[in-house]
Image (cartoon, helix red, strand yellow):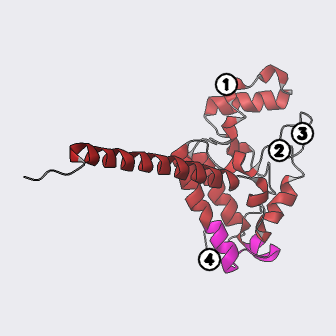
Amino acid sequence: MASSPLGNGGSRKKTYLILILVFVAGIIFTGLFNVGLSMTNEMDYCTSCHSMKINLKEYKETPHYKSASGVRATCADCHVPKEFVPKMIAKVVAAKDVYHEIMGTIDTPEKYEAHRWDMASRVWDKMRANDSRECRTCHDYEQMDLSEQDRSARKRHGRAMDEGKTCIDCHKGIAHEEPDEPEEEEGEA
């Protein structure tokens, strides 16, 4: 039997080289993926579509944008989960907004307003379903010092904790204008 001039050692070296190359490629891919993902969380990226300029204008008038303490929440802070799997799901779902911008469904202020209630309702439903997870990265009942809040807030937050309410149950319209609920058409109900 003729043996390879490199013997078994050459085959092992080739296998190790391939494994090292795959490992390095994985690191590079992961780094590029993370950079790309981070870029899509930037405020400039989020508000680059015409329709999101409406949200940006509203947001700039809220305490989430300008506060006495200088702390600012960005689009990603409120709309993108921190955990990897929920973040990936949010990114895939957000692709529909880009699609609708490109297709012209929400590309003008008038079209955007026509769809605002449905869009807001979907966000509110998501926030209820996940117990306002993104809000709670900054606003957590357990971390609140109710004694430092005014009487009304202290009472409402205390009751909300007892009743298991989530942030969005009381704070709709906190960062964007709350849309008017559409009137029911005759024959509906």
Q: Earlier in the sequence, mark 4 or mark 3?
A: 3
- For residue 113: magenta? yes
Q: Label 2, on which residue?
A: 64
The residue singled out by tag 3 in the image is: 67
> Tag 4: residue type?
Gly
Q: Residue at x 82, y 42 (%)?
A: 72
Q: Earlier in the sequence, mark 1 or mark 3?
A: 3
Q: In the figure, residue 93 lies in which quadrant? A: bottom right
Q: Which residues are magenta?
A: 96-114
Task: Between residue 164 and residue 123, name the one nearer to us.
Answer: 123
Look at the numbered disc 2 and give the secondary structure of its residue: loop
Point out the tag, 2 or 4, that comes first from the N-terminus: 2
The stretch drawn in magenta includes residue 50: no
Mark 4 and mark 1: Cα distance apart in space: 46 Å
Q: Nearer the viewer, mark 1 or mark 2?
A: 2
Residue 185 visible within the image? no
Q: Secondary structure at mark 1?
A: helix
Residue 77: quadrant of the picture = top right
